[in-house]
Amino acid sequence: MGLCLNALGRYADARQHARRGVEIAPDDPELLQLLAMTYNREGRYDEALGVLDAAVARRPDHLGLAAARSEVLFQARRYDEAAAAVGPFLDDDPPHIAVAIAFGQSARRVGREEQAVSLLRRAGAASDVPIPQRISSLFILGNLLDHLKRYDEAFAAFDEANRIKGERPDIDEYSASIRRMIEAWTAERIRSLPRSLETSDLPVFIVGMPRSGTTLTEQVLSAHPRFHGAGELRDVHTLVGELQHGVEGGQWHLFALDRLAERPLTRFARRWIERMRRVAPDALHVSDKNPQNYLHLGLIWAAFPGAKIVHCVRDPLDTCLSCYFHDLGGPHVSIGSLRAVGRWYAEYRAVMRHWTAVLDLPILELRYETMVERPDETKRRLIEFVGLEWHDAVTEHHAVDRPVLTPSVDQVRRPIYKTAVARHAHYEAHIGPLREALAE
């Protein structure tokens, strides 16, 4: 139950189950790891390390505990200690996959990329590596090789990882669901829809394709003392599932608009706002940066009349390749092949064109490349759009100490850099299928 609740982002509930498990079996390493990783996801690094330090002291030979401790230290920006946490196990032959993954995560920060590449390759060659860890190790390996400018080898690692994952969901069925949603949300139908009575301007939704700069955008906003970045919330996706329950083919997108009603929308919005005010009582605005809320802007328009939308946009080739290069999950992620990710991107653009045409929503389109080229100007435009006065702390967004649970965790803790712009040029020999899919 704790694992399931963690996967749903319900960390406080997960923590209660983990604590209960530890009370029943205080020396169980898996339960101790669960409790520590729940603290980790909440950004409570000292408490996570307290659990793991005590566990490792009792079980210094336990690989899983050492790897978990390394991950928490990495999240806490203690990079040398993160690498050292698995140091005693690096010479094992063959190395354990959990150790290789943990070391690979921190290797770039301590200048030991080549050692991590060797370790990941040897660990991944074992026949008994579980598939999820095999996939994770390949993505980490690919990103290390990319950093070392060994682009052909990097692409081979990413390609194998995506081949193992496979394509999902069924792209034709998914596309049909998007068409049904677009056809339902006509300008005429929208004018007759009920809306929530809760008009607070607290919510800011940061949307776009994954890997388009949504985490960077939230990090910049979170540097402002009156803004709170809540991360990738699942509330809107959950509400879609509830509204579409029992509708044939309705698990992804909201098209059963007859199920919208003023009272439930108001109740949903007020509960969301009350919860965010408890989490961040001093914040004037709070963001949900689940990028795939772009699919549900119609529902957001109905539930949160006072909300603002920041739409993050990045070069299509760079966006798609970055999605292909990371272990993304969720029901709205369609990767598996370059052609599939290109088609996914095209669907996203069609959805955003539709919402822009039919909804009366304040939307700021924020280009990643502009943020990189003109960061000060772009930051000021972003702060002004959400309705805040400028604060100099925003210039040092990378210094903000907050939990980041996306693949961008390491990038947003650095000053803005330019090397991710036009990244696709390094992979020109491999991206023919992606170009074809985008052209179609």
Image (cartoon, rainbow, N blue to C red):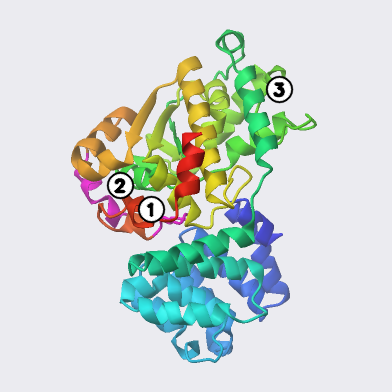
Q: Nearer the viewer, residue 23 or 185?
A: 185
Distance of mark 2 from mark 3, alpha carbons? Answer: 39 Å
In the rendered structure, which amino acid carries the disc numbered 3?
Ala
Q: Please tell me the numbered disc located at residue 428.
A: 1
Q: Position of residue 66 (x, y in %)?
A: 52, 81
Q: Is residue 45 left or right of residue 260?
A: left
Q: Is residue 66 visible?
A: no
First in sequence: mark 2 vs mark 3: 2
Taking 401 as reference, is 72 above or below it? below
Residue that numbered label 3 is attached to: 256
Q: Is residue 213 visible?
A: yes
Q: Quadrant of the N terminus?
A: bottom right
Residue that numbered label 2 is attached to: 223
**Magenta extent:** 391-409
Q: Is residue 18 left or right of residue 300?
A: right
Quarter assignment of residue 314 = top left
Taking 160 as reference, is 128 above or below it? below
Q: Are marks 1 and 3 in contact (CB under 8 Å)?
A: no
In the rendered structure, which amino acid carries the disc numbered 1?
Glu
Q: Are marks 2 and 3 in contact (CB under 8 Å)?
A: no
Distance of mark 1 from mark 2, alpha carbons? Answer: 37 Å
Query: What is the secondary structure assignment of the residue under circle 1?
Result: loop
Q: Nearer the viewer, mark 2 or mark 3?
A: 3
In the rendered structure, which amino acid carries the disc numbered 2?
Ala
Distance of mark 1 from mark 3, alpha carbons? Answer: 43 Å
First in sequence: mark 1 vs mark 3: 3
Q: Residue at x 62, y 82 (%)?
A: 126
Q: Nearer the viewer, residue 307 or 210?
A: 210
Q: Nearer the viewer, residue 408 or 183?
A: 183
